[in-house]
Image: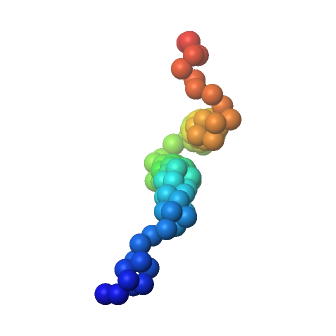
Amino acid sequence: MNDTTFRNSYITIQQRIGLIFVFILFKFIIMSILTILLVVIVVGVILWLVNSYIPMDSKIKSILNAVVVILLIVWLLQAFGILGSLDSIRV
């Protein structure tokens, strides 16, 4: 292996910074978005299964749907940082 091949096998500092940036982007942004999408899809499928296969009165189904959608919206608002933590709310 000659000197130029050996020199070209090293990663430059700019390439390392780029790789670190891509890793951080993937770790924190893309994985967060994928987690949010996965939760929304799972909740939707579970709600669809409950609505389709569990016999209930239509009023109960509509109340259940409203509660699940409201809870999902509150969770999404917290996930995106629009709504702060709900720990300070006393019931």
| Residue 82: x %, y % from top left | 68, 35
Which residue is pictured at 60% across the width and 35% down the height? 78
Residue 66 can be seen, yes or no: no
Give the tally of numbered discs: 0
Which residue is pictured at 57% across the width and 16% down the height? 88
Q: Residue furthest right?
A: 82
Name the residue nearer the viewer: 18 or 24.
18
Name the residue nearer the viewer: 68 or 25.
25
Q: Residue furthest front?
A: 3
| Residue 91: x %, y % from top left | 55, 12
Residue 5 falls in image quadrant: bottom left
Which residue is pictured at 35% across the width and 87% down the height? 2
Picture layout, residue 77 above or below residue 29? above
Q: Quadrant of the N terminus?
A: bottom left
Name the residue nearer the viewer: 91 or 64.
91
| Residue 16: x %, y % from top left | 49, 62
Which residue is pictured at 51% across the width and 63% down the height? 13
Q: How is the image coloured?
A: rainbow
Q: Residue furthest bottom?
A: 2
Q: Residue furthest top?
A: 90
Residue 57 can be seen, yes or no: yes
Name the residue nearer the viewer: 21 or 79.
21
| Residue 8: x %, y % from top left | 44, 79
